[in-house]
Image (cartoon, rainbow, N blue to C red):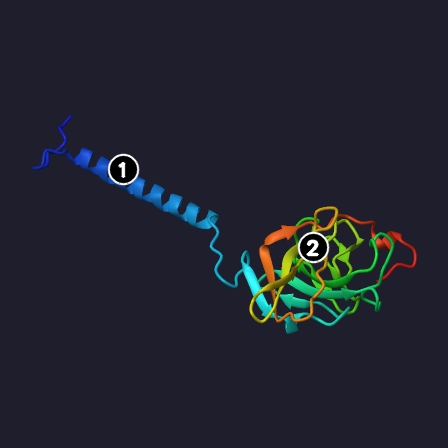
Amino acid sequence: MAEATVRADGLTRREFLYYIWGASMALFTLEVAGLTIWFLLPRFREGEFGGVFRYSVDVIPEDNAPPANFPDGRFWLVKVNTLEPNELMCETEGDGGQIVGAAALYKVCTHLGCIYSWVDANDRFECPCHGSKYRLDGRRITGPAPRNLDRFKMSALDENETELASSPVTNDGGYDVMKIPSGTTWIEVDTGDKKSTGSQKLLSTIPDSCP
């Protein structure tokens, strides 16, 4: 068998090709590792999902009005008041008393993670995947969702950006609705701070419940 041709620098042609192949594989591995790290690391910028969103307090809907949609942050803003019930919101069994305040609802169904929507014709949130339905404040109307909609932390700020209030924590560890204090100019929603709001009794199993 003929010997491999020796290059002037002392490397055979075969060795040269091995070095080229090895360098190519190393470069490919580095590219894959870089892409993996880029994909896994959070890349949240100001105003993107995963960060803190700030809005004028005027974006909050009126009491018991249809929710305001914020697709960039993947949440709905709602304002509920069971002292002034209507077809969207009233106090029912298991609510734990009156519900007055605002909340930011995570726009993902608690069943299998589908994106639900607000259905004006039915005055409720409905998931198209498996039929879970929720009241204006995120409480389950019917399953198969195992719990109410999750909520993000909200804060109320005055014109000097001093915090006046934030979402209180319920007995089950979730975020309760936040009453909007007098003097509130801004509201903030922290989409990096999400909590479950528990799994109260299904409204569909309570006679004469609303909505």
Secondary structure at badge 1 equals helix
**Residue 22 located left or right of residue 81:** left
Residue found 28% across the figure and 42% down from its top: 24
Residue found 87% across the figure and 54% down from its top: 93
Pick whichever of labels 2 and 1 is earlier in the sequence. 1
Give amino acid for label 2: Pro
Judge whether 192 appears above or below 181 on screen: above
**Where is residue 145 shown, x and y percent of the image?**
74, 49
Q: Residue furthest left?
A: 8
Judge whether 93 appears above or below 69 on screen: above
Q: Residues within 10 Å of mark 2 (few under 14, many from 20)?
A: some
Residue found 80% across the figure and 49% down from its top: 200
Secondary structure at badge 2 equals loop
**Is residue 9 or residue 117 the one in the foreground?**
117
**Corner quadrant of residue 189:** bottom right
**Where is residue 176 shown, x and y percent of the image?**
72, 55
Residue found 62% across the figure and 71% down from its top: 185
**Is residue 78 or residue 26 the one in the foreground?**
78
**Where is residue 101 shown, x and y percent of the image?**
74, 63
**Is residue 4 or residue 158 the one in the foreground?**
158
- Please say if the residues under marks 2 and 1 sit with CB atoms less than 8 Å apart: no
Q: Which residue lies furthest to the right in this view?
A: 207
Q: Is residue 136 visible?
A: no
Q: What residue is disc 2 on?
A: 168
Task: Tell me the quarter of the image containing the C terminus.
Answer: bottom right
**Corner quadrant of residue 67:** bottom right
Circle on res. 67 = none
**Corner quadrant of residue 71:** bottom right
Circle on res. 22 = 1
